[in-house]
Image: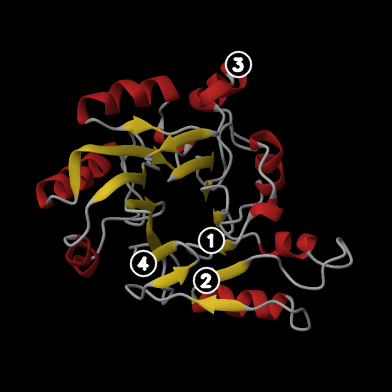
Amino acid sequence: MKIKLLGTGAADGIPAFHGDCRVCRHAREHGGKNVRSRSAAVIDNCLKVDLPPDTLMQMHQSKTNAKDWTGLIYTHSDEDHFAVDQLQYALHPFTDMDHLGFQIYANSTIAKLIWGRYPAWPLEVNITRSFCPIEHGAFRIIPVRAKHGAQGEDAHNLIIERDGKTLLYATDTGIWPEETWFHLRDFRLDALVIECTNGFVPNEYDGHLDIQQCCDMVERLRKMGTLSSNSRVVTTHHSHHGGATHEELEEALKPHGIEPGFDGMLIDIS
């Protein structure tokens, strides 16, 4: 399984649209791994995870082609993960297609927003529910409940299995509810992609993680046996408000066996 991180930034990216903090200035000056677009990924070049407003730019930079996608699965309805207007560009009159070339998987909140935005368009949405497995081609996907999102929304992190390999893609997690921890006890992960939104700056909002919380979550998974010493752990969804450059994240996370992700990073667990 190959996971390409197309974007690894939080809602406003790095450098932010109107950001003038130290992290934003550093990213403008140094570029490279310090520049982060909104979080998204593609698995084995065919399973797309989230569709942020930066999608087109990410596709150009990574040479990703939407015609290769067989499925698009959303994690939750925040606008940096679910840019509903992007879907129309895959259909007539923007293309010669009268139907999508890929399946959409989304929770009921997102499904209602899609159907409300495109009431007369041929868009079918497969409803996802926490802890209910999905079969998509060679993939088996199990959404697990995140502590994140709007009141009443079933926000998801995603266990993705294929050819004997298992990934947990966990952006916008918060500290999981106990039902999620309980579910994860039965899995052995080859790779974990986990958010580290708040970096060095703890936040009262409990829907995101700072570095300490991220490391604590990883350590708990290791003690459970869900993560092994060989499991690869990579971060995503970094905010400039977290006060950390990419190099500072590397230094802080290395002692914990965690790698900071970056836009364009390829994680190969084949």
Neighbor class of circle 4 (other Cα within 10 Å; few <14, some 14-19, many 20+) is many
Percent coordinates x, y for residue 163 in the rendering: 37, 54
Neighbor class of circle 3 (other Cα within 10 Å; few <14, some 14-19, many 20+) is few
Instruction: Choose the circle earlier in sequence order: 3 or 1.
Output: 3
Residues under labels 4 and 2: Cα distance?
Answer: 12 Å
Q: Is residue 99 visible?
A: yes
Neighbor class of circle 1 (other Cα within 10 Å; few <14, some 14-19, many 20+) is some
Left or right position of 4 against 228: right
Residues under labels 4 and 3: Cα distance?
Answer: 41 Å
Asked if disc 4 and disc 3 are in contact, CB closer than 8 Å, the reply is no
In this view, the residue in front, 16 or 31, is: 31
Instruction: Choose the circle earlier in sequence order: 3 or 2.
Output: 3
Q: Closer to us: mark 1 or mark 4? A: 4
Task: Residue 29: give its label.
Answer: 3
Amino acid beneath label 4? Ile
Amino acid beneath label 3? Glu
Determine which residue is flagged by label 4: 142
Task: Residue 78: give its label.
Answer: 1
Amino acid beneath label 1? Asp
Instruction: Choose the circle earlier in sequence order: 4 or 2.
Output: 2
Neighbor class of circle 2 (other Cα within 10 Å; few <14, some 14-19, many 20+) is many
Residues under labels 3 and 1: Cα distance?
Answer: 29 Å
Left or right position of 42 against 97: left
Percent coordinates x, y for residue 17 in the rendering: 65, 38
Quarter of the view holding residue 63: top right
Instruction: Choose the circle earlier in sequence order: 1 or 4.
Output: 1
Residues under labels 2 and 1: Cα distance?
Answer: 12 Å
**Vertical position of residue 154 compared to residue 141: above or below:** below
Q: Residue furthest left?
A: 223
Q: Closer to us: mark 4 or mark 3? A: 4
Residues under labels 1 and 4: Cα distance?
Answer: 20 Å
